[in-house]
Image (tube, helix red, strand yellow):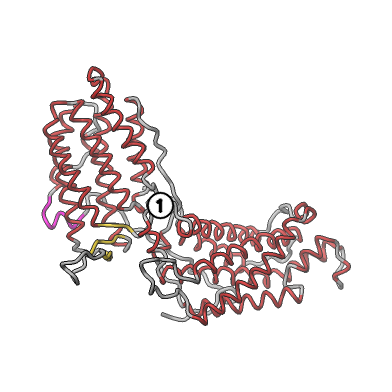
Amino acid sequence: MNSGPATYGELMGRALAEVMAALREPPDFLDVRDAVRLAVVQGRVSRSADRVLGTFAIAAPIVDEPDRVPNVDDDELTRISALRGQLSEVGRAMDGLARSEDAFKASRPAGHHPAVASLLRGHDYAGAAWDLLETRVTSPKSIDREPVLALWSQDSTRTILADAATFVHSCFAAQDCLAPALLQGISRRSGRPVVRLDELDFIGKTAWLTSTLDAAWRDKTVAIRRLTEELVDRFGPVPLGDVDHLTAYVRPRIQQPGTPAALGRSVTEYSRWLEEHAVELTIADARAAIGVASRLTLLAGIVHPAVAPACTRVLDSWRACHHRLTDLASRHPSPDDDAGATVLAQGVSEILSALEESPSSIHEWAAATAVAVAYVPRFTRVIEGSLFAGRRSGTLLGRQESTRYPNEAAPSRWQPVSDDSRQIRGVQLVLRQALRELVTHVLPQLGDHGLKPDHLPAVADLAVTKEALATPLVHIPPSTVRRSTATQPSAQPRRRRG
């Protein structure tokens, strides 16, 4: 299975790795056009970092949790405010440079040195990570607020703040490393060693004034590096948190199945998407998949009357599974946001309505329905495996009913599920009951239209004993994000050991 789209943790890890690579091999000569381009990009990153620091330095506004503690203490907030002031000044200065037509023309790519290319890629990765936070956390598209609020936890927000401080520190450390190379580039552009700033042309002056060659800019860089180093030292080692698993919305490309051929394509695409994104599937995706399975099972019972009794039993299991999934939740939003599954489910519902109005066309759907139902065991097994992966990665939550006031209505609490979670086993039981019925009494009756036997689970694998339920039908590794471990004394602030 593919690992799916890059996560926030992976993007930040790549950003830091690119900056560290540039610092390990600084160029001997830096073209002034590259220097100006780096300055423009760094101004954009400074504005983005300023926005991220301002967003996550305070607690999320939650109405029903008035006593929520701030994400930073007063001393840390003071440092963040000072850092934001410095970054804001850098952003404003670079805004004017970016709008300058002469600077734009002069800063066109100049055959980048590998170190310059690494820095540009690092800026792009960090920008993509912060854009991801913007779309998934500060402006979520999902109407389910619980997973989003989990990302506002103190651990997650402090991870985000530490990431931002570390990356900003590394970027401004790069300016010190690039200053000697830039001086060589300015001298080569002028044709002689440079003594005074007024001897330079416009682009040369711009490169000088936006680097540590300039005394005022050097003081600003020193202040930013000091503040970021203090912040990272206070935040301690950057932990692996829920926010590291955050990914972009990547929905399956499903068209509403209005014809038999379209039904086969849609179910195939949906099954493929579930397999490719198995690591990041949520409980919302599981409920949506069960809804699709229910409608396809109902369609099979209508189009193939011989399997109608067995389909009725399978439908009972799907309903029980959907109900038991309400006691589980995921920390992170759905990568599908129910869009693809909804289109497919609505399309099958419309097919059912059309067949009810025109029963004479039932035979036209026989082959397509057989193929579609044969995919159900495949993506249902992926759903079961994703529950185990979510449990191991700590992203799966279980509903814990309050027992403090047994006679009063009390809000449910969500806690990470344990290894012997009865909630997961309850879902497994009805899932496997449905699969046993499908494999034993439904799919064999559909003729040669369905998938080949080697694509289907064996009945012996669908046991419901305690030992059998301890292992999923499909193993899906938990989502893991490893941050870059590369270190560089001039770029990596000292970190307190946990």
Q: Residue at x 18, y 58 (%)?
A: 470
- Residue 351 position in % (x across, y down): 29, 28
Between residue 315 and residue 425, name the one nearer to us.
315
Please tell me whether residue 312 is drawn above or below residue 479 in the rendered image. above
Residue under label 1:
142
Q: Residue at x 16, y 67 (%)?
A: 407
Residue 271's quadrant in the figure? top left
**Quarter holding the C terminus?**
bottom left
Q: Residue at x 24, y 50 (%)?
A: 384
**Mark 1 element type:** loop
- Residues shaded magenta: 464-471
Q: Amino acid at mark 1?
A: Ser
- Residue 280 position in % (x across, y down): 36, 53
- Seen from this angle, which residue lies furthest front? 408
Between residue 117 and residue 382, name the one nearer to us.
382
Q: Is residue 470 in the magenta section? A: yes
Q: Residues within 10 Å of mark 1 (few under 14, many from 20)?
A: some
Q: Is residue 308 in the magenta section? A: no
Q: Is residue 111 left or right of residue 317?
A: right
- Residue 485 position in % (x across, y down): 48, 69
Residue 371's quadrant in the figure? top left
Q: Is residue 145 left or right of residue 412?
A: right
Please tell me whether residue 294 is drawn above or below residue 199 in the rendered image. above
Q: Is residue 361 left or right of residue 170?
A: left
Please tell me whether residue 469 is drawn above or below residue 89 in the rendered image. above
- Residue 192 position in % (x across, y down): 87, 66
> How many labels, in total?
1
